[in-house]
Amino acid sequence: MTPEIDDRFAALKARYGTDSLERVEEMLEPRRRSDRRHPLQQAAKWVLPGIPQQPWHDPYAYPELLPLVTALEENHARIKAEQELAWEQRRASFTDYEHYLVRQRNWQALYLYRDGALVADSEPLAPTAYKVLKENAVDTGVICPLLESHFSTLLPGGAIKPHCDLWNFSINLHLAIDIPEGTGIRVAEETRTWEEGRTLLFDYSFEHEAWNSGDRTRTCLLADLWHPDTTVPERAALTVLMTEIQKMMAG
């Protein structure tokens, strides 16, 4: 680790206790690891020990996430209308989705949160989703600042190939905006489809894929949230750690 990381970790331990970052430190020391990865989680780069090996989660089961889930579902109709208008009239605001593995033209994104902050330019295009996200995810600290929230539009015939994301300490929430026939998502060994106006929640450190075999676009609103089983000091430490790693990789 770098001196910056060491200093921040020491400060967090002084505040929260000497064992508050034990799982984070174990993740960084392969010889100390006691966890055993699920076979369909092997490609994830970082696996925090002690996180349940559970691909799919009940979005209504976590008090910390429930205000966001409820607000998104209650405002679905307005969110959908605003997204559709933006797609029709401001298509240039949508960009090819840049996954860490690949850039896809048939997967379009309108970002609401990125690089640790809300995307102010998107507020006029999607004011309801922006407000809900700000009040129930950003202001409450449940969004993972290392990642993002965006409208995810998969074009007809588009597919997202099977892959694992980088780590298991954040979790992916989907609000189903517009769902044609012939769409689906597989996480680990279970395939589901979206129900318009409802949410899905899953651990994307497990292998997953999605597809749109329909004749029109499939759109969901995605939000990368802290996994409910992570603690406040762990979230602070992981933010510092991954930010420094990304800086080193970029340099």
Image: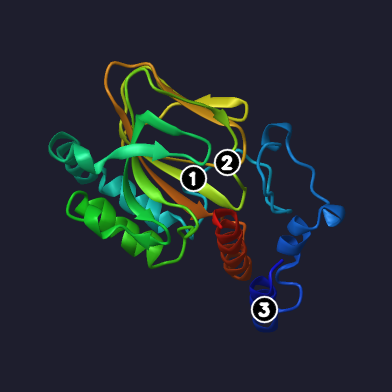
The amino acid sitting under disc 2 is Asp
Q: Mark 1 near mark 2, Cβ–Cβ under 8 Å?
A: yes
- Percent across and percent down for residue 85 are 14, 39
Q: Say left or right for 123 vs 221.
A: left
Depth check, mark 1 against mark 3: the one in front is: 3
Quadrant of residue 120 within the rendered picture: bottom left
Residue at disc 1, secondary structure: strand
Label 1 Cα crowd, 10 Å radius (few <14 / some 14-19 / many 20+): many
Q: Mark 3 near mark 2, Cβ–Cβ under 8 Å?
A: no
- Residue found at x 62% / y 37%: 206
- Percent across and percent down for residue 242 are 59, 59
Label 3 Cα crowd, 10 Å radius (few <14 / some 14-19 / many 20+): few
Q: Report the quarter where the C terminus lies.
A: bottom right
- Residue found at x 20% / y 54%: 127
- N-term mark: 1 or 3: 3
Q: Taking 234 as reference, is 95 above or below it?
A: above
Query: Does residue 185 show up?
Result: no
Circle number at residue 7: 3
The amino acid sitting under disc 3 is Asp
Give the residue at the far bottom of this rendering: 14
- Total of numbered circles in the picture? 3
Query: Is 144 in front, or is 120?
Result: 120
Q: Taking 175 as reference, is 136 above or below it?
A: below
Residue at disc 3, secondary structure: helix
